Image (cartoon, rainbow, N blue to C red):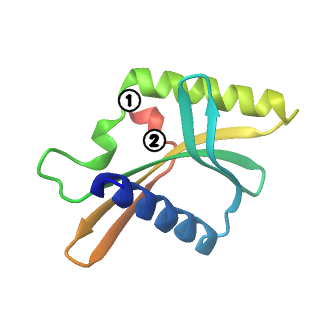
Amino acid sequence: MAQHNELGKKGEQLAVDFLLQNNYKIIARNYRFLKAEIDIIARKKDVLVAIEVKTRSSIDYGNPQDFINPKKIKLLVSAMDNFVVENDLEVEVRFDIIAIIKQKNAFEIEHLEDAFLHF
């Protein structure tokens, strides 16, 4: 497996661990709909949260969250809409980003709630 794929998988697992420690319940991982994939779908209280995980080995080319463009947001919103309809849910939905930067042997995790409001 390519090194960037391994870093991505490690980042997703770190994000899951972080969410569990912060009282989120993991509902689904790598949910696919058409051309979209939601890395993590979690629930906290009455809110269903779609979480995009971005992991980078450095910030030389920008912060991890800077790599999410309007097209990606549109795909994620479409996928989340489908998940809600498919599962006949009536919940508030939120879109978060978990940005992870590897620094030497440690990882810095930043959780951006309601992240798409800033685009």
CB atoms at circles 1 and 2 under 8 Å apart? Answer: yes
- What kind of residue is marked 2? Ala
In this view, which residue lies farthest toward the right? 88
As rendered, which of 1 and 75 lies closer to the eye?
Answer: 1
* Rendered view: 103 above or below 15: below
Number of the label disc, if any, that sits on residue 13 = none
In this view, which residue lies farthest toward the left? 60
Circle 1 SS class:
loop
Q: Quick one: quadrant of the C terminus?
A: top left
Q: Badge 2 is on which residue?
A: 115
Q: Within 10 Å of the Cα at label 2, are there few (<14), some (14-19), or many (20+) other Cα atoms?
A: some
Question: Viewed as shown, does residue 118 lie left or right of 25?
Answer: left
Q: Badge 1 is on which residue?
A: 119
Separation of residues labelled 1 and 2 (CA atoms) = 8 Å
Residue 71 quadrant: top left
- What kind of residue is marked 1? Phe
As rendered, which of 47 and 38 lies closer to the eye?
Answer: 38
Question: Viewed as shown, does residue 73 lie left or right of 29?
Answer: left
- Give coordinates of residue 77: x percent, y percent: 58, 27
Residue 35 quadrant: top right
* Rendered view: 31 above or below 99: above
- Give coordinates of residue 41: x percent, y percent: 65, 48
- Give coordinates of residue 58: x percent, y percent: 18, 58
Residue drawn at point x = 32 percent, y = 69 percent: 108
Question: Viewed as shown, does residue 9 lie left or right of 40?
Answer: left
Residue drawn at point x = 51 percent, y = 65 percent: 13
- Give coordinates of residue 90: x percent, y percent: 84, 35
Circle 2 SS class:
helix
